[in-house]
Image (spheres, grey):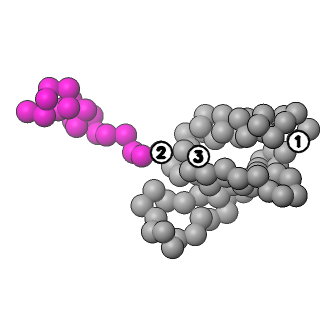
């Protein structure tokens, strides 16, 4: 069975009043709602996105709000952290 995933994105530093922005969607194939949830999360995390919330729609389908992952620290910062910040 195919399940429609409606995708929204919100910035990491968004204010509580900032609404998520619709960013498209996709379908996942699964026999159960739990399987659909797992498939949607797996796809989004493989794309480097962080799932902030996931809800099921009464009429079928899923709504997922994602954020982009935090930027990786710069190489110089990583080196300092390993040496104890000195």
The quadrant where residue 57 appears: bottom right
Q: Which residue is drawn at 82% across and 51% down?
A: 61
Q: In which quarter of the image is the C terminus?
A: top left
**13 to 86, vertically: above or below:** below
**83 to 72, vertically: above or below:** above
Q: Mark 2 or mark 3: which is in front?
A: 3
Check disc 2 and report its element: helix, strand or loop. loop
Q: Residue at x 88, y 33 (%)?
A: 31
Mark sitting on residue 51: 3
Q: In which quarter of the image is the N terminus?
A: top right
The earlier-in-sequence mark between 1 and 2 is 1
Residue corresponding to mark 2: 69
The earlier-in-sequence mark between 2 and 3 is 3
Check disc 1 and report its element: helix, strand or loop. strand
The quadrant where residue 76 appears: top left
**Which region of the structure is painted magenta?**
70-86
Q: Which residue is drawn at 45% across and 56% down?
A: 12
- Circle 2 crowding by C-alpha within 10 Å: few under 14, some 14–19, many from 20: few
Residue found at the far top of this picture: 83
The quadrant where residue 22 appears: bottom right
Check disc 3 and report its element: helix, strand or loop. strand
Q: Which residue is drawn at 17% across and 32% down?
A: 80
State the separation of the CA atoms marked 1 and 2: 28 Å
The earlier-in-sequence mark between 3 and 1 is 1
Residue corresponding to mark 1: 2
**Marks 3 and 1: CB-CB under 8 Å?**
no
**35 to 27, vertically: above or below:** above
């Amino acid at each position: 069975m195919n399940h429609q995933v409606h995708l929204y994105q919100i910035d990491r530093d968004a204010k509580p009043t900032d609404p998520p922005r619709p960013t498209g969607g996709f379908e996942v194939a699964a026999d159960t709602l739990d399987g659909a949830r797992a498939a949607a999360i797996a796809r989004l995390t493989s794309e480097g996105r962080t799932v902030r919330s996931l809800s099921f729609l009464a009429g079928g389908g899923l709504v997922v709000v994602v954020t982009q992952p935090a930027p990786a620290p710069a190489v110089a910062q990583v080196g300092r952290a390993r040496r104890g910040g000195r």
